[in-house]
């Protein structure tokens, strides 16, 4: 089987697992769905929340130099003129004269012809129109009047909410440079060709942190944040052989950036950006200062002159990171002639961290197991399952990405020990309830 076919199969399997286990469903499915919009089900919602919390914790709670923010999605429309989005946030669009499909002119080699899916629009023989710029911002109207004066944009990135609050946050938190502002929130882009499941959608979530530094220290902090972000992914157990850096060349570099690196992951559909780390210089604050007349320069007693801080940005997609965890964690193993699916999610973010099973539904095992479950539930995402054969219960949890399973069996009733099974090593240990919490805590943090 060709590598391409294998890779398509893998995406199909992941999409199907997500539906089956309740990670991700097509949006408005009973109405036939809406192109490239997805809903996160019970396990997906939990995984997504854990992921955002894990990022938030690393960025804010564990540090003294970064403050959190939750800015509005709808902003003053002038913000998007100032930022350059109204004029320049556009992708080149081409139409195929034959099949009428639309493609991004800068990604033609990666696009597929709808009539001949094995070929790109460069190879299928369809004639393409000249490229024209297509602005990716969604618009709506504020208030009851639908005219040009009432147009507002639905934010295409969370970053601008941070820049316009730079003064507010600086003044209320009394932070001194270098310091950062972190935000997690929805962003919307009217992408020409969304696709690859939750990789590219029109509604998505970002985890962005903007770090304000003295202009003489930009390169030092840029390197610092590259390292930090790389290690963050590593701490999620992602296979780092499938991660790489991509440095933006001069032709790729955004007009505001001095240096830019993407962290890329090797998805089944190829190497693609997961997160961008950019040195945005003083571009954003200078533009907002010019447009509003507000003094956004910085000073404190360490500096003789006021200056506009440079910004080092780390910008990651929540949905893309989640997809990365699914792709990276998906594993098929043959056990006793049966193909079994394991989702090897890090215990740090797994939607269910520990499952508790009585071996059988009698002899006091369910009562014992339920008591243990109620204790574990206070500290971990725990799940209790009593129905069906024990093998099937384990299999369900393996697919759900649950890293630890606890079974109460006959021996438990004699000596109060239970088996604790590690999803990835398949090792089983016996321990008493008193040791469980410490063991799980250690495993989750290791
Ligand atoms: P791409 O080249 O893939 O369109 P970009 O360079 O426009 O991405 P940025 O503007 O740097 O992306 O956005 C930062 C991050 O937000 C990306 O690394 C990605 O994780 C996420 N992101 C951007 N666009 C989308 C989208 N349409 N769907 C899902 N996530 C997205």
Image: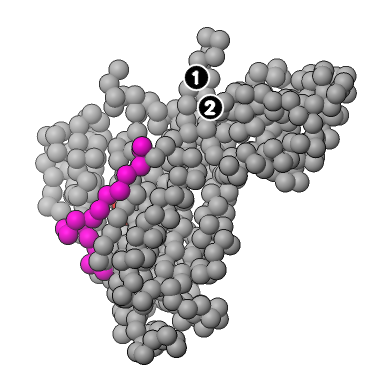
**Nearer-the-camera pick, 194 or 294:** 294
Query: In which image quadrant can residue 284 be found?
Result: bottom left
Q: Measured from the top left, where is residue 228 in percent x and y?
A: 43, 55
User: Which disc, if any, is residue 333?
Assistant: 1
Visible in this render: residue 46?
yes
Q: Residue at x 40, y 50 (%)?
A: 230
Q: Is mark 2 within 8 Å of ligand 1?
A: no
Report whether 386 appears left or right of 131: right
Residue 81 visible in the picture: no
- Above or below residue 405? Residue 111 is below
Q: Is residue 337 above or below residue 362?
A: above
Q: Which quadrant of the rendered structure holds the N terminus?
A: top left
| Count of numbered badges drawn on the protein | 2
First in sequence: mark 1 or mark 2? 1
Distance between the Cα atoms at labels 1 and 2? 7 Å
The structure residue drawn at horizontal position 27% and vertical position 49%, both measured from the top left corner, is 246
Q: Is residue 352 left or right of residue 166?
A: right
> In percent of the image, x 38 and y 86: which residue is there?
303
Identify the element where label 2 is drawn. Answer: strand
Judging depth in this view, the residue of 401 and 161 nearest the camera is 401
x, y percentage for residue 300? 44, 86
x, y percentage for residue 394? Answer: 64, 24
Identify the image quadrant of residue 328. Answer: top left
* Cβ atoms under marks 1 and 2 closer than 8 Å: yes
In the rendered image, the residue lying farthest to the top is 337
Residue extent of the magenta highlight? 241-256
The image's mark for residue 342 is 2
As drawn, 338 above or below 370: above
Q: How many residues crowd mark 2 within 10 Å: few (<14), some (14–19), many (20+)? A: many
Residue at the extreme front? 302
């Amino acid at each position: 089987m060709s590598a391409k076919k294998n890779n398509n199969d893998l995406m199909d399997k992941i999409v199907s697992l997500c539906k089956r286990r309740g990670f991700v469903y097509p949006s408005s499915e009973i109405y036939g769905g809406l192109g490239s919009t997805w809903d996160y089900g019970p396990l997906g919602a939990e995984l997504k929340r854990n992921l955002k919390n894990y990022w938030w914790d690393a960025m804010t709670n564990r540090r003294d130099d970064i403050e959190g923010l939750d800015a509005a999605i709808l902003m003053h429309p002038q913000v998007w003129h100032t930022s350059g989005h109204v004029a320049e946030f556009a992708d080149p669009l081409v139409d195929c004269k034959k099949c009428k499909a639309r493609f991004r002119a800068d990604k033609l080699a990666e696009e597929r012809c709808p009539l001949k899916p094995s070929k790109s629009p460069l190879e299928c023989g369809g004639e393409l129109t000249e490229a024209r710029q297509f602005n990716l911002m969604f618009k709506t109207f504020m208030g009851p009047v639908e005219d040009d004066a009432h147009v507002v944009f639905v934010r295409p990135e969370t970053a601008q909410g941070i820049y316009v609050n730079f003064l507010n946050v600086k003044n209320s938190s009394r932070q001194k440079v270098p310091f950062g502002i972190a935000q997690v929130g929805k962003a919307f882009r009217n992408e020409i060709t969304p696709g690859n499941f939750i990789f590219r959608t029109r509604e998505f979530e970002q985890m962005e942190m903007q770090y304000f530094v003295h202009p003489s220290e930009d390169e030092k902090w840029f390197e610092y944040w590259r390292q930090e972000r790389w290690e963050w992914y590593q701490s999620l157990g992602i296979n780092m052989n499938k991660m790489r850096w991509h440095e933006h060349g001069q032709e790729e570099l955004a007009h505001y950036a001095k240096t830019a690196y993407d962290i890329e992951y090797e998805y089944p559909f190829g190497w693609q950006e997961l997160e961008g780390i950019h040195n945005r210089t003083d571009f954003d604050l200078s533009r907002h200062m010019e447009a509003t007349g507000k003094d956004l320069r910085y000073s404190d007693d360490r500096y003789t002159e006021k200056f506009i801080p440079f910004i080092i940005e780390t910008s990651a997609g929540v949905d893309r990171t989640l997809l990365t965890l699914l792709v990276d964690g998906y594993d098929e193993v043959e056990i006793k002639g049966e193909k079994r699916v394991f989702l090897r999610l890090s215990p740090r973010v797994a939607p269910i961290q520990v499952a508790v099973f009585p071996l059988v539904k009698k002899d006091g095992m369910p009562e014992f197991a339920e008591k243990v479950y109620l204790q574990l539930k206070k500290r971990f995402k725990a799940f209790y399952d009593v129905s069906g054969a024990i093998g099937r219960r384990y299999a369900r949890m393996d697919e759900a990405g649950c890293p630890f399973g606890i079974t109460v069996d006959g021996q438990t009733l004699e000596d109060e020990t239970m088996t604790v099974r590690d999803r990835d090593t398949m090792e089983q240990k016996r321990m008493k309830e008193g040791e469980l919490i410490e063991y799980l805590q250690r495993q989750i943090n290791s």
